[in-house]
Amino acid sequence: MTASLSNRKEYQDIFHWAETQQDGAIPSFGLQKDDPYEDQSGFNNSFASEAVPGTLPQGQNSPRNVRFGLYAERMTASAFVAPRHLNKKAWLYRARPSVAHQGFMRRGHSHVGLPDNEDTEANFPPSNPRFHLSPTQLAWLPFDVPDGDGIDFVAGLKTIAGSGDPTLREGIATHIYAANSDMKKTAFANSGGDYLVCPQQGALDVQTEFGMLCVQPGEIVVIQRGQKFKVNLPDGPSRGYILEVWGANFELPELGPLGANGLANARDFLHPVAEYEIEQEPWTVTYKLGGKLFRSSQQHSPFDVVAWHENYVPYKNDLTKFVNVGSISVDHLDPSIFCVLTARSRDPAAPLADFLIFSPRWDVASHTYRPPYFHRNVASEFMGLLYGDYGGRSGGFQPGGASYESGMVPHGVAYEEFKAATENEPPVMQISKGAVAIMFENSRPFTITDFAWNTDKKHEHDPKMWNNLVDNFSKHQDEVKKLLASKEKART
């Protein structure tokens, strides 16, 4: 009987989650080892959950008296009149409403005594001398996980690059986090946008107003705008990547001619079930608004939601369940086939952001140049590596590190890889075995933060890697001249 793989790292060695099911062993399982929580599956569903049976009001949302004396609180994340498929909201039934706090204080205020995190950014104007534009292909070695104790998830945030402005509700930011401590009696809410978090080292135990989520390397979690959460580190120090979007929520990409199935399946997105915490103790909630941090104090836990319903709920996804598609004859399809989630922009022809993965798959195209072809495309690409070795990048591209290529800047593999791919008949093969790389893609150029620009982890792709891209065409000049002469003769 299948229960789970024996340890977490075994999930990094499988080709696809289907391998864990052992050819129909009953019951199969849907969660990685050591995931202790219940979940609800689906994407953009209207869910309902109650930790105490009979708590949710039936047939209405805001009765005159909620059972057990709970307060009804509505969270609305879209315009009230937004089309039904874009309308985002949730009803929460809690011991005390979120308004029960003791006011806000700017973080860094003398009464608070906690400085701002100077390595986080939210506005990315190219004119600001603290930001840097570069057409050079940049990369970063793995970022350090801090030693000791006292750096929690929020304190460990570092912004790498971004574009736009959260107050204009249009843009994105890319961050890394490196933490060594649980969040203690404190919660965080991003009032500007949605966080898509990819742990690379160490699991995250995420407490949300809607319930608990365990997120391990190879999984992602999306905490949406305004939702309060707290992160504990069950494996000790943790590191990972964050894509933040302003102005849209993530959704599944359209499948087009693929039909009904493929890429990320809706059933593989998991949402928490209600689990409340009643504590009459001092708590703080840090709010991020317009890129600035503010704190409020309160005398109760912010996670006192006994029941909730509707569709504005945090969720997670296991990337090993992604269904890769590709060419089974010749040539490669565009990288949109690797898109897990997308977020809309005001431009109908270009998304605000795409989240892509490059995971184990078969490469079978015949008479085809297999590596990434030399290209210039409108998208700016920020890449990270969750685990394994990823082909097509230098040896400096390691788990916990990153790379960046600006839109319309040419890139491609070194000559040696080009030469091998054009001279040797490639076999039918599995590629990216034991590896998952991620990409945050945006149609605008990013500006790079001071932190990312000045860190000793930064290095540049050496242009010398393309020095051997010789002019082969000139070696065929005699043949070309004969063909041109023959063409001219045919004209006359």
Image (tube, rainbow, N blue to C red):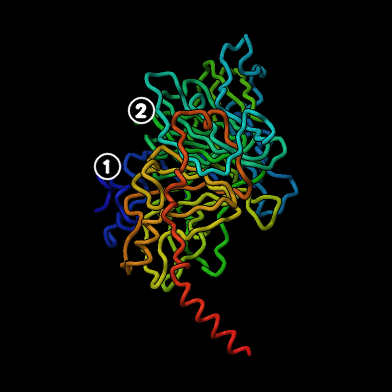
Please name whichever residue, 100 or 490, is drawn nearer the observer in this view of the structure.
Answer: 490
Place residue 195 in its image quadrant: top right
The residue carrying mark 1 is 7
Residue at image position (51%, 28%) is 454
- At label 1, the amino acid type is Asn
Depth check: 134 or 144 in front? Answer: 134
Residue 37 pos. (x, y %): 40, 40
Q: Residue 119: x and y, percent? A: 55, 26
Q: Secondary structure at mark 2?
A: loop
Residue at image location 37% in from the left, 60% down from the top: 361
| Image position of 358 (left or right of 186) | left
- Image position of 87 (left or right of 209): right
Q: Which of the pair 233/52 is nearer the observer?
A: 233
- What residue did someone put label 2 on? 236
Q: In this rendering, would 242 be left or right of 418? A: right
Residue 335: x %, y % from top left: 50, 58
